[in-house]
Image: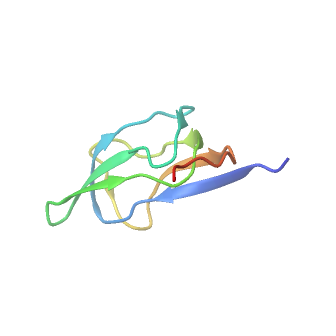
Amino acid sequence: MSVTEEAIFSPCSGTVETVYTEENNHVYEWKKLFLIRTQNGRMEEVSIGISGHITSLPVKEGQEVNTQTVLATIQDDLIITGSE
């Protein structure tokens, strides 16, 4: 079985207001992971369409980020979930 890791990049430039997870946590699809205040003051929620374990979490609350910043890395559990 292969292991798939995915980097989660910031969708915008701004400041990390809230980190809703921790390293080694299991997260589910579309669960809110971060809240970023953009440079124009708007709040941007960050979630992803895969579930798995957070293997790295290099950002902290209050940190400045941009679209090149890796917020976290997740090891995909390859379990497909969803609803109709």
Name above or below for residue 19 compared with residue 6: above
Rendering quarter of residue 26: top right
Name above or below for residue 23 compared with residue 8: above
Residue at screen point 51% across, 53% down: 84
Residue at screen point 30% across, 65% down: 13
List x then y, in percent, for residue 75: 65, 45
Residue at screen point 37% across, 37% down: 20
Which residue, as the protein is rendered here, is positioned at the far left? 41
Number of marks drawn = 0
List x then y, in percent, for residue 2: 82, 50
Rendering quarter of residue 38: bottom left
Residue at screen point 56% across, 40% down: 54
List x then y, in percent, for residue 82: 54, 49
Which residue, as the protein is rendered here, is positioned at the far front? 84
Rendering quarter of residue 60: top left
**Residue 24 shown left or right of residue 15 in the figure:** right
Q: How is the image coloured?
A: rainbow
List x then y, in percent, for residue 56: 55, 42
**Residue 2 shown left or right of residue 77 in the figure:** right
Which residue, as the protein is rendered here, is positioned at the far right? 1
Front residue of 26/13: it is 26
Front residue of 59/11: it is 11
**Residue 39 shown left or right of residue 55 in the figure:** left
Front residue of 25/49: it is 49
